[in-house]
Image: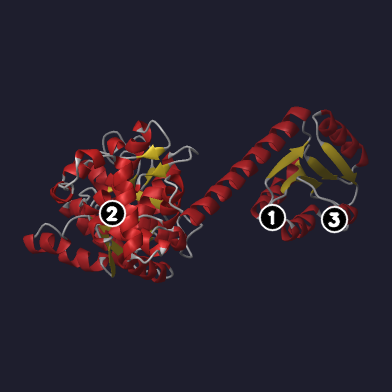
Amino acid sequence: MKRILLIDDDINLAKVIGYQLRKNGFEVVTSNSGRDGLRIFNEQKFDIVITDIQMPGITGIDLLGEVRRQDKDVVVIIITAYGSIENAIEACRLGADDYLTKPFGQEQLMFVIEKVLRLRELQQENSQLRRQLQGKYRFENMIARSSKMEDVMRFAGQVAQSNATVLILGESGTGKELIAKAIHFNSPRKDKPFVTVNCPSIPDNLMESELFGHVKGAFTGAIRDRKGKFELADGGTIFLDEIGDLKEDVQAKLLRVLQEREIERLGESHPIKVEVRVVAATNKDLDKLVRKGNFREDLYYRLSVVPITIPPLRERKEDIPYLVEFFIQKYGEGRSLEVDPAIFPALQNYDWPGNVRELENAVERALALSQDDAISSVSLPTQIFTSDKNADEMNLNISDADLSMEKFEKKLIVEALNRSGGNRSEAARLLKIPRHVLSYRLKKYGMN
């Protein structure tokens, strides 16, 4: 039950409003002066404060300021006479959620209360989602066990604190957007918008409007004014994904935005100032495109103030067991799953042309196909095991009697323990599996 503090020096009106609120399921505490109302607010917890503006002593505006100083989450609704709407508008500017003009009926009262409560719930949900995003994209929560990825994360963490333009380079599927989001959500701009523009997906004739917006009538089909992505990202970060696909005419206009920090909507002649951090990404060789004349050299230098190169998965294979475990948790729907250690050598021998995205898809596929609580080679894509490297390594001299996965696993484990002198952590490293997976297999096979 929501608790409401109702403050109005008109005793009869306060009784009527209090009765209407109680009839609609609210718990109501009434006060007939600003000073007494403030005392009650300091002593008790309320969800909503409804206060008249014109009161002797402490006015509704004074009360609003003190309430907001103590509790930014409580909903405040102002009551004002019809001739004093300016005061109510000023109160909203100072932090009130809405206002009611006298006289008002029960339906209008309930409509305003329900509206501001729903708006506050949405604001709280957005704040919670933003906190979850900030936690999700914390650098320390990202999987980077290889030295190359540790270097990338460390450098990106330093860059995040600045306003410098960043150019993220890397093959498709390496996680360029993930790094861009991490930079934003670990920066002073984290509470402002993060706006993504996927350059290849936008038709050439709409790109300028998409980036900079347009006014009504600027072109056929422009039936209303529309803000572009740069305006929507004002105060935050705009992520220009696959910037290498941007056409030359738009490149020139983007260069001007980076230089002047202002945009012009299509069909409008006056510039609009924007304060946006630009993070761009591409899987193309921009140096090569510049030499061919397909990408502006001056724009390239503007974008690559701070370049960050993400290594492909084949150069950070130490991360594979941890990525597999992460994707199992992501797609496993709470199932208790184990990974057959015998598959890890194959996973690490495979070159992963699709990088982390391909590995994620492979794990999701394996989870969908696995019939028990283990992921084995049977449920993984066949190309992983038929690659040149894995085909060579699988050409083993094993007798028919020993041709079973369990015996093969036991031999691998024994060999790793022998080489490590019985050290389980070292044996797990040799097998390229997490230590807890090795412990599970030892227990399963009675090898403790």
Could you tell me which residue is drawn at 9 percent across and 60 percent down? 293
| Residue 303 % position (x, y) | 26, 64
| Residue 346 % position (x, y) | 24, 49
| Residue 127 % position (x, y) | 57, 50
Give the labeled residue for mark 3: 38
Could you tell me which residue is drawn at 45 percent across and 56 percent down? 137
Q: Name the element at disc 2.
A: loop
Give the labeled residue for mark 1: 72
Q: CA distance from mark 1 to mark 2?
A: 41 Å
Q: Name the element at disc 1.
A: loop
Q: Earlier in the sequence, mark 3 or mark 1?
A: 3
Residue neighbourhood size for the residue with mark 1, other residues' Cα within 10 Å, grouped as few (<14), some (14–19), many (≥20): few
Q: Assign the N terminus to one quadrant of the image.
A: top right
Residue 116, numbered circle: none
Q: Earlier in the sequence, mark 3 or mark 2?
A: 3
Give the labeled residue for mark 2: 174
